[in-house]
Image: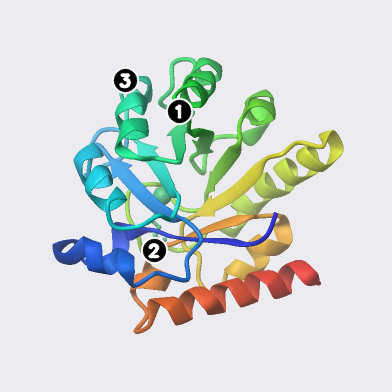
Amino acid sequence: MSVTITPSILSADFTRLGEEIGRIGNADWVHVDIMDGHFVPNLSFGPAIVEAARGVTDKPFDVHLMIEEPETWVERYAKAGADTIIFHVEAAADPHALVARIRELGARAAFSVKPKTPIEDYLDLAREADQVLVMSVEPGFGGQAFMPEQLSKVETLDRLRRAEGLDLTIEIDGGISADTIGQAAAAGVDSFVAGSAVYGAPDPNAAIDELRRLAEAARAR
Ligand code: DX5
Ligand code: ZN
């Protein structure tokens, strides 16, 4: 899989979200962080905002549900226009059933693990999913420092998919910048979520291009 750059609109200026999505034309996907104030100690937006944003871009939406009871909500997010729906295993009652349900709804099925959650407990789930999101910060806020030790999870997943020929996308989220993207790419990441590194830059598209260049260079090595 080629390098996928996935800016997070959590770091965008919400007073003009439509224009902000227009400023990331060089991105591959758009990452949408849904926070409920319970699973994580912060609130962001809900399905109405996803639906509104859906009207301003054709780019795939990578919807990251940092919410309790994700099974109650996946249908709403699928209808709002999510292309990939990512739930947290720590919040799901039956992760295997939820992967199947997301597929039934016509979306790509993904799950995420928080930094303290071991990936070894979810290798069977990875065999069924389209994508795994490895959190490289505690979920809840943009702008936190990258946790390099989380890359061992990426390496485990990369070994698994190579050994078994799985069509699995590995994504990382949290603290990705020009300083950290190379190590993540070398470990096996395909999709790089970046919030502050893209929207904090004077020219978001130039930041996206630079992140892509660094990821491709690290992979080629
Ligand atoms: C954190 C979110 C991230 C966040 C990343 O809980 O899941 O997607 O937007 O922001 P940066 O790239 O600034 O760490
Ligand atoms: Zn996220």
| Helix, strand or loop under label 3 | helix
Residue 3, above or below 110: below
Find residue 86 and report its horizontal and vertical position in percent: 46, 37
- Residue at the image position 44 percent from the left and 16 percent from the top: 93
Asked if residue 125 lies left or right of residue 56, the reply is: right
Specify which label sits upstream in the sequence, 2 or 3. 3
Asked whether residue 14 appears in the rendered view, the answer is yes
Find residue 160 and report its horizontal and vertical position in percent: 78, 37
Instruction: Tell me which corner region of the image, top left, top right, bottom left or bottom right, holds residue 157.
Output: top right
Any atom of ligand 2 within 8 Å of the CB at mark 3?
A: no
What type is the residue that disc 3 sits on? Thr
Label 2 and label 3: CA atoms lie apart by: 27 Å
What type is the residue that disc 1 sits on? Glu
> What residue is pinned by disc 2?
195
- Residue at the image position 46 percent from the left and 53 percent from the top: 137
- The C terminus, quarter of image: bottom right
Please name whichever residue, 165 or 145, is drawn nearer the observer in this view of the structure. Answer: 165
- Residue at the image position 40 percent from the left and 55 percent from the top: 58
Find residue 133 and report its horizontal and vertical position in percent: 54, 44
Label 1 and label 3: CA atoms lie apart by: 15 Å
> What residue is pinned by disc 3?
72
Q: Residue 90 carries which label?
A: 1
Q: Which residue lies furthest to the left in this view?
A: 15
What type is the residue that disc 2 sits on? Gly
Any atom of ligand 1 within 8 Å of the CB at mark 2?
A: yes
